[in-house]
Image (cartoon, rainbow, N blue to C red):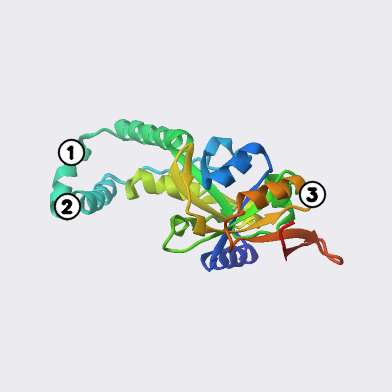
């Protein structure tokens, strides 16, 4: 990665870590409006995403020396099983009796387990630190005919566990024997190609295909797309008719720049 790209990635991560609000772009379908009314968001399986490389990262492995495998696994056992490091080393000496071909077979099986977990076990909630990106309005909000939900993120609500995606130019390197499979899966989920950096994405991780309820205080505003119909706007106004602190915004084109302006509006 060049210095300019490295600096940009650092800037995005720092900006994201300071985010108090996260945004979810949605179309104005009946399903989207129903989920909005029910105060639910969805953790989608990775294979439903529009980027074929997303979460399809092929983990790059090398088989380390046997002593290194034993040492790293002993540290994991020590942390997770409550035994001493020396006890863990003693238990793991059996690894030395496994032929190299057996370790390579084990490594291949681990690769397949991680791929399967990414495809079937983990669901992802995709949010953004940005609410005014023209491309995202086009891709995820039905060509600006949809809306964008503004969520408050804090350590005290479920979005406090979301993390920013890191954008890179090369596949990340993983050594299974240095870490637990769940941690490797998490790193894969939080890594995307550099070309997607404009999304400033944050991700939450849950069981795949989960619809999770959120509390009313987590949602603070709705932004209407440039092309959203008044009929759809009124439906959303009605959904929040009893939420007095709800703020509504309209996305509008700026006069002299290819940018969007997000302006507060009143109900009508």
- Report crowding for label 1: few under 14, some 14 to 19, many 20 or more residues within 10 A (C-alpha): few
Q: Residue furthest front?
A: 242
- Report crowding for label 2: few under 14, some 14 to 19, many 20 or more residues within 10 A (C-alpha): few
Mark 1 vs mark 3: in front = 3
Residue 194 position within the rendered picture, expressed as x and y whole percent measured from the top left: 62, 53
Q: Which residue is mark 2?
A: 82
- Circles 3, 2 touching at the beta carbon (< 8 Å): no
Q: Give the secondary structure at mark 2.
A: loop
- Report crowding for label 3: few under 14, some 14 to 19, many 20 or more residues within 10 A (C-alpha): some
Which residue is depicted at the point 20% across and 53% down? 78
For residue 168, which numbered disc appears in the image? Answer: none
Q: Earlier in the sequence, mark 3 or mark 2?
A: 2
Q: Earlier in the sequence, mark 1 or mark 3?
A: 1
For residue 227, which numbered disc appears in the image? Answer: 3
Residue 200 position within the rendered picture, expressed as x and y whole percent measured from the top left: 61, 58
Q: Which residue is mark 1?
A: 94
Quadrant for the N terminus in the image: bottom right
Asked if one can make out residue 15 in the rendered structure from this viewpoint, the answer is: yes
Q: Nearer the viewer, residue 18 or 198?
A: 18
On screen, residue 257 versus residue 156, left or right, reads right
Residue 129 position within the rendered picture, expressed as x and y whole percent measured from the top left: 60, 60
On screen, residue 164 versus residue 176, left or right, reads right
Disc 1/disc 2 C-alpha distance (Å): 20 Å
Q: Nearer the viewer, residue 253 or 134?
A: 253
Residue 203 position within the rendered picture, expressed as x and y whole percent measured from the top left: 51, 51
Q: Earlier in the sequence, mark 1 or mark 2?
A: 2
* Residue 230 vertical placement versus 98 (above, below): below
* Residue 4 vertical placement versus 78 (above, below): below
Q: Quadrant of residue 30?
A: top right
């Amino acid at each position: 990665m060049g210095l300019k790209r490295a600096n940009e990635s650092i800037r995005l991560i720092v900006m994201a870590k300071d985010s108090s609000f996260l945004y979810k772009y949605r179309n104005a379908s009946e399903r989207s409006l129903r989920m909005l009314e029910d105060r639910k968001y969805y953790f989608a399986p990775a294979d439903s995403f529009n980027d074929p490389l997303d979460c399809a990262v092929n983990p790059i492995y090398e088989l380390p020396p046997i002593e290194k495998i034993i040492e790293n696994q002993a540290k994991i056992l020590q942390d997770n099983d409550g035994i001493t490091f020396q006890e863990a080393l003693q238990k793991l000496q059996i690894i030395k009796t496994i032929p190299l071909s057996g370790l390579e077979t084990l490594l291949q099986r681990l690769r397949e387990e991680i791929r399967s977990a990414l495809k079937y076990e983990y669901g992802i909630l995709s949010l953004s630190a940005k609410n005014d990106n023209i491309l995202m309005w086009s891709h995820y909000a039905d060509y600006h005919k949809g809306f964008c939900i503004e969520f408050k993120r804090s350590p005290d609500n479920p979005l406090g566990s979301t993390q920013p995606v890191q954008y890179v130019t090369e596949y990340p390197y993983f050594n299974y024997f240095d870490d637990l499979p769940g941690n490797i899966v998490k790193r894969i989920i939080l890594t995307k190609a550099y070309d997607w950096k404009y999304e400033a994405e944050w991700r939450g991780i849950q069981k795949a295909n989960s619809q999770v309820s959120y509390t009313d205080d987590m949602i603070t505003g709705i932004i209407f797309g440039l092309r959203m119909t008044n009929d759809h706007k009124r439906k959303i106004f009605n959904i929040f008719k009893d939420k007095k602190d709800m703020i509504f915004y309209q996305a509008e084109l700026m006069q002299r720049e290819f940018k969007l302006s997000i302006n507060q509006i009143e109900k009508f």
